[in-house]
Amino acid sequence: MNTDDPELPDILRRSWHRFADTYEPLRGELFRYCRHLTRSPWDAEDLAQDAMARAFATLGRMGVAPTNPRAWLFRVASNLWLDQVRRPRLAIEPLEDVTRPPAELREAAGTLLVQLAPQERAAVVLKDAFDFSLADIAGILGTTVGAVKAALHRGRGKLREPDLESGRVPARGVVDAFCAAFNAHDVHGLAALLLDSAAVEVVGATASHAADETREQMLRGMLFGSERLADAATLGGIEARFVCGARPTFPRAETRIYRDEALALIWYAHEDGEHVRAINRFETDDGRIAGLRNYFFTPDAIAEVCAELGVSHRPNGYRWWLSREGCP
C-alpha cells in the first residue's frame, strides 16, 4: 500500500507555524532555562529544540490545550533533561568553562549548580531564576510541594563556586581550511573537507547524513544564501522583519576560539556594516570534518556566543519560511 501523501509536509508545516504562534514567544525564556540546566549554549539549544518538538508532538495527542503553556513547556524540557541525566552513560563529558558567563545568567543563578542533583538543580532554577510558584514547580517536576521545598533547601545549601577546567581541544586547522574554502566561494573545496559519512545540519531546519545532493545544496545555501536573505520579503527563507538591511553580497567566514573550541563565525554584509548571522561548529576526525552544525535559526545561542566574543550580530528568528505567504 502506498502511504505517500505529497501534501503532508505542507500540512505539518502549517500546523507547526500555528503551534509556534503560541509557544515561540516563550522560546527565549525556554533557552535560558535549558542554559541553566545544561551549562552550555550548544546543549541548551539542543534541549530547547527537543522540548519544542516534543511539545508539538504531545499537543497533537492531548484532548485540550494546556491551561498554562509556560509551565507546561518547562515541564516538557525538565522531563527531557531529567531523562538524559539519569540515563546510564559510558563516559562523562568534561564540563565547559563557565567562569565568564553572561551577566544575565550570573545575576539569575551565579556560577551555579554543578554540585546539585538533577531535581535540586531544576527546582532552584525554576524558583530563583524564573520565579515559578512552589505549586507550579511541583507540577513541572511531577512531585509534591513538600518535595520541592526539600529540594530547594538542599540545593541552596550546596551551591558554591565551581572549579572547572575545559577539556575541549580546538580543531583550528580544519576550521581555518573551511573558512578559506568558504571565503573562496569554493563549494567543491568545502565538500572535500567532509568525510563521506559526515552529517551536515542547519539546526532546527534540515539535515543531511550522507555525501548526496542535499548536502551540497546545504553548503551552497551557506555560501550563496545571502541573496535570498536580502530579498526575503519576496523570496522567503526567513521572516521579512529579520532582514535588517542585509545585502546580497557573499558572507565571510572567520575562525574564532570560544571557550577553547574553534568556531567559524559567518559575517553578512548589511547597510550599516558586517554582522554575524550564523555560527558553524565542527566535529573532526583525522584532519577532516565528521560533523558540521550551522546555527542560523538559533538567535539565543548566537546572541550569547557573540556577546562573550564581543562581536556584533543580527538575529534570524526561529523559523524558516518557504514563501512570502508565510511571513507576517
Image (cartoon, grey):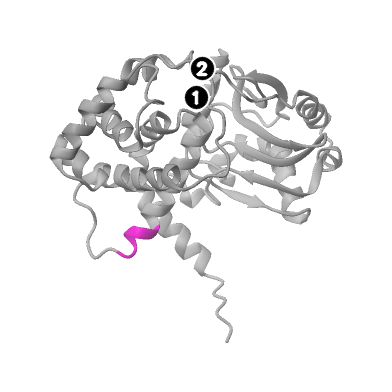
Q: What residue is disc 1 on?
A: 303
Q: Position of residue 102 (x, y in %)?
A: 44, 16
Q: Quadrant of residue 254?
A: top right
Q: Amino acid at mark 1?
A: Ala
Q: Position of residue 310 (x, y in %)?
A: 56, 12
Segment tinted magenta in the rendering: 57-61
Q: What residue is disc 2 on?
A: 307
Question: Disc 2 versus disc 1: distance between alpha carbons?
Answer: 6 Å
Q: Are marks 2 and 1 in contact (CB under 8 Å)?
A: yes
Q: Which residue is found at the position 86% from the left and 38% from the top?
A: 189
Marker disc for residue 128? none
Disc 1 crowd, CA 10 A, few/some/many (<14, 14-19, 20+): some
Q: Is residue 20 left or right of residue 67?
A: right
Check the image and report above or below for 101 versus 76. above
Q: Which residue is found at the position 48% from the left and 14% from the top?
A: 99
Q: Amino acid at mark 2?
A: Ala
Q: Position of residue 162 (x, y in %)?
A: 43, 17
The residue positioned farthest toward the bottom in the image shown: 1
Nearer to me, 213 or 135 = 135
Check the image and report above or below for 207 versus 178. below
Nearer to me, 167 or 37 = 167
Disc 2 crowd, CA 10 A, few/some/many (<14, 14-19, 20+): some
Q: Is residue 108 left or right of residue 247?
A: left
- Is 180 one of the magenta-colored residues? no
Q: Position of residue 97 (x, y in %)?
A: 53, 19
Nearer to me, 129 or 185 = 129
Q: Secondary structure at mark 2?
A: helix
Image quadrant for the C terminus?
top left
Nearer to me, 30 or 86 = 86
